Image (cartoon, rainbow, N blue to C red):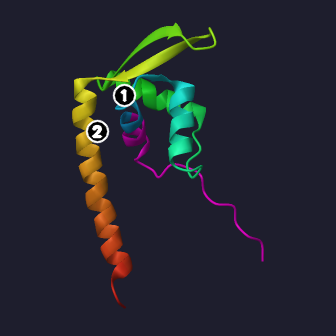
């Protein structure tokens, strides 16, 4: 029997929360956001650049992120994203929802048959 590779995709519905949380620490460019999420998750989550770009556009439309073009540390041009005050409020909402759902899943997994 073949051993399955671990799933490194982000859990559906959590990408926005992960981006908002990452940017709550400091403004970053897209590659920096992807790298931070991968590092902090211990490699459990691998970021798809296409999914990130779509998420950045959606989060900007919602008013939860602002962005500006700037130079990176190695003198390349990159779009830096930062959290807005509305983004901080949304992060609180999404974190509370995640904690509620995770607790419910935990209870279901602990239930005796």
Kindly state the secondary structure of the residue where label 2 is placed: helix
Dot in front, 1 or 2: 2
Query: What secondary structure prevails in the magenta region?
Result: loop
Q: Which mark is residue 59?
A: 1
Tell whether 29 sits left or right of 108: right
Disc 2 residue crowd, few under 14, some 14–19, many 20+, Cα 10 Å? many
Q: Does 3 lie within the magenta span?
A: yes
Taking depth in this image into account, of 42 and 48 the one nearest to the observer is 42
When the figure is inspected, residue 97 is found, relative to residue 60, above or below; the finding is below
When the figure is inspected, residue 19 is found, relative to residue 4, above or below; the finding is above
Q: Residue at x 28, y 30 (%)?
A: 87
Q: Which mark is residue 68?
A: none
When the figure is inspected, residue 1 is found, relative to residue 101, above or below; the finding is below
Q: Residue at x 78, y 77 (%)?
A: 1
Q: Does 66 lie within the magenta span?
A: no
x, y percentage for residue 15?
44, 42
Q: Magenta stretch: give its range.
A: 1-19
x, y percentage for residue 51?
53, 35
Q: Residue at x 62, y 10 (%)?
A: 76
Disc 1 residue crowd, few under 14, some 14–19, many 20+, Cα 10 Å? some
Distance between the alpha carbons at the discs numbered 1 and 2: 11 Å
Residue beneath disc 2: 91
Q: Residue at x 59, y 38 (%)?
A: 48
Tell whether 81 sits left or right of 104: right
Kindly state the secondary structure of the residue where label 1 is placed: helix
């Amino acid at each position: 029997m073949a051993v399955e590779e671990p799933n490194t995709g982000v859990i559906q519905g959590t990408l926005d929360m992960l981006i908002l949380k990452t940017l709550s620490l400091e403004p970053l460019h897209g590659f920096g956001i992807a790298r931070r999420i991968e590092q902090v998750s211990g490699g459990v989550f691998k970021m798809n650049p296409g999914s990130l770009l779509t998420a950045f556009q959606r989060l900007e439309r919602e008013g939860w992120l602002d962005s500006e073009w700037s130079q990176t540390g190695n003198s390349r041009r990159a779009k830096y994203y930062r959290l807005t005050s509305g983004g901080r409020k949304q992060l609180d909402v999404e974190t509370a929802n995640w904690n509620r759902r995770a607790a419910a899943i935990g209870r279901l997994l602990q239930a005796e048959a």
